[in-house]
């Protein structure tokens, strides 16, 4: 196996940018591409290199890391933009975005036909985990492909799990993760909605709940942000519209009933429909407030 030294990184967004910078810190040669010139310039300032296209970034690279929005963007980068063909023979493709398991399997088949490795490696941990290189990474890949990519993965996350030998298995674990995260955020908002209706101060509520058996990581993290008029965006409402949609698609494919995920998806969808899609995902609470608002003529 050839050691990975040069990496093309496509998708320098809120999470992708610090992930790429952490690879630079680990002495990989990182060439990045993003549609935004400012994102490319930031990588150069951090010690990396910038390219004017995905194919140029990937030219003769040992690995391509994609932190894109969805599977459609991954396909566009690999096949339409020509990044896959530009990679070195035997190079590795690491897909780290949240994508439907079936789509990941399909992309993997097309990549491995060219003699290159494919590593299904979605992440959890948000912007803070991306910055501190403490992401949880769930990997579905043959052992040889995983071993080759592991130094790259270790540079971005401190909890790297090889969950299966097949691409799509990492995506499946991430799908289950997003099911739990989405439901936890939505039920925290539902609890706050009930408390507010009864005149309970939300700050007191979350202080009590955060230290009780009812607590969850999402309740402690998102709960306080639900009380802010302009919460800083760590992950947007529309991300969970997308991710819970993936959860429900996976449920349909597996003939598995997911009623709680469906209810949570409806609340995120309602919040987005009210114009809050770009707000922090804690603002799913706005859909509950709209649903439970008193009529204007109520005393």
Image (cartoon, helix red, strand yellow):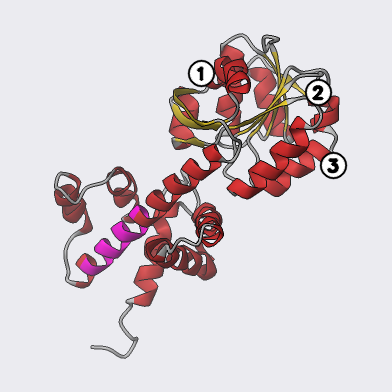
> What is the number of the mark on residue 87?
2
Locate residue 254, reporting x and y percent. Answer: 52, 57
Identify the residue under disc 1: 154
Mark positioned earlier in the residue sequence (3 or 1)? 3
Q: Residue at x 56, y 30 (%)?
A: 165
Determine whether the residue tagged by mark 1 lies in a helix, strand or loop: helix
Decide if residue 61 is in sight here: yes
User: Within 10 Å of the Cα at label 2, are there few (<14), some (14-19), or many (20+) other Cα atoms?
Assistant: many
Q: Whole-Å distance between the Cαs marked 3 and 1?
A: 30 Å
Above or below — where is 105 with respect to 194? above
In the picture provided, is 186 more to the left or to the right than 111?
left
Judge by depth and name the residue closer to the eye, 275 or 129: 129
Image position of 36 with respect to 117: above or below? below
Whether pointer 1 and pointer 2 mark residues with C-beta atoms closer than 8 Å, the reply is no
Let me know if residue 160 is in the magenta part: no
Asked if the residues shown at circle 3 and circle 2 are in contact, with their CB atoms under 8 angstroms apart, the answer is no
Span colored in magenta:
184-194
């Amino acid at each position: 196996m050839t050691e990975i030294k040069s990496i093309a990184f496509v998708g320098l967004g809120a999470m992708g940018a610090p992930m790429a910078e952490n690879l630079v810190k680990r002495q990989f040669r990182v060439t990045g591409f993003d549609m935004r010139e400012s994102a490319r310039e930031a990588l150069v300032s951090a010690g990396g290199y910038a390219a004017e296209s995905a194919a140029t970034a990937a030219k003769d690279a040992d690995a391509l890391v994609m932190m894109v929005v969805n599977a459609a963007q991954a396909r566009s980068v690999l096949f339409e933009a020509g990044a896959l063909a530009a990679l070195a023979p035997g190079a590795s493709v690491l897909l780290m975005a949240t994508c439907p398991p079936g789509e990941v399997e399909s992309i993997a088949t097309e990549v491995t036909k060219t003699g290159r490795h494919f590593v299904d490696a979605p992440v959890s941990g948000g912007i803070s985990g991306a910055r501190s290189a403490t992401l949880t990474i769930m990997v579905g890949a043959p052992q040889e492909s995983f071993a080759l990519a592991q130094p790259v993965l270790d540079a971005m996350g401190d909890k790297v799990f090889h969950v299966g030998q097949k691409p799509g298995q990492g995506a499946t674990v991430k799908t289950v993760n997003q099911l739990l995260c989405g439901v936890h955020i939505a039920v925290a908002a539902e609890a706050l909605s009930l408390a507010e209706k009864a005149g309970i101060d939300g700050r007191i509520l979350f202080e009590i709940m955060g230290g009780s058996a009812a607590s969850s990581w999402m309740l402690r993290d998102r709960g306080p942000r639900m009380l802010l008029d302009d919460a800083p965006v760590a992950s947007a409402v529309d991300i969970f519209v997308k991710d819970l949609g993936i959860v429900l698609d996976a449920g349909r494919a597996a003939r598995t009933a997911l009623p709680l995920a469906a209810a949570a998806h409806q609340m995120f969808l309602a919040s987005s429909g009210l114009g809050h899609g770009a707000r922090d995902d804690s603002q799913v609470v706005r859909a509950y407030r709209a649903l439970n608002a008193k009529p204007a003529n109520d005393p």
